[in-house]
Amino acid sequence: MQRLKLFTWCLFLLVGCGQIAVEPKPAPPESITSDDYDVAVVSVDFDPALQGSRLPISDKYAVLVALENRGLLTAYNVKVNARLRRTSDDILMLSGSRSVNELAPGQIIVVRIEPEGAIPANADVYSLIVRAEPLSQETLTSNNTREFTIRVEP
């Protein structure tokens, strides 16, 4: 099965910005063992979609998170969070979350997160962290998080 393409996120107003660059950080290696519970963030994308490593200027963005149940048992009530922080002072600029009621073993779904808020159109660097909250019985959590650096340039 072909992996889903790189997915990523944000919902913010960027009026007057020149370019927005998105740089994914390395994903953790895949596990070779199977646990009863293992929910993984497979990939992240933006809507509107990336153009290469650039995010087109838009007044609204959504983050699309591909979530996979790599465990042997059905996962229930999986919460997925997306948080955007300004790296210069670690201020939380935007956040949003969605919950998945049920995720069967081997199932991959795309979760759409549309946070509310606005980001100043100033040139700056942000950190986007997308995380599936670990289940109470989940032991492998290194694949629950994906991180990105987002640069807003004039």
Image (cartoon, rainbow, N blue to C red):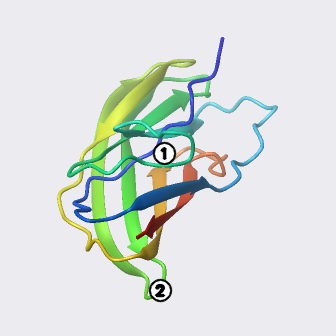
**Quarter of the N terminus within the rendering:** top right
Residue at mark 1: 135
Q: Quadrant of residue 29?
A: top right
Rendered location of residue 67, percent (x, y):
49, 32
Q: Which mark is residue 46?
A: none
Q: Nearer the viewer, residue 111 or 23?
A: 23
Image coords of residue 63 (percent x, y): 36, 44
Q: For the residue labelled by badge 2, is the local secondary structure a helix, a strand or a loop?
A: loop
Q: Residues within 10 Å of mark 1 (few under 14, many from 20)?
A: some
Q: Relative to the observer, which residue lies in front, 46 or 15? A: 15
Between disc 1 and disc 2, the foreground one is 2
**Looking at the image, is mark 1 or mark 2 earlier in the sequence?**
2
Residue at (36, 33) in percent of width and height: 111
Instruction: Determine which of the numbered discs, if any, sits on residue 88 in the image.
Output: 2
Q: Residue at x 67, y 46 (%)?
A: 140
**Total numbered labels placed on residues in the image:** 2
**Residue type pointed to by label 2:** Ser
Seen in the image, is 54 located left or right of residue 121? Answer: right
Residue 50 coordinates in the image, percent (x, y): 47, 40
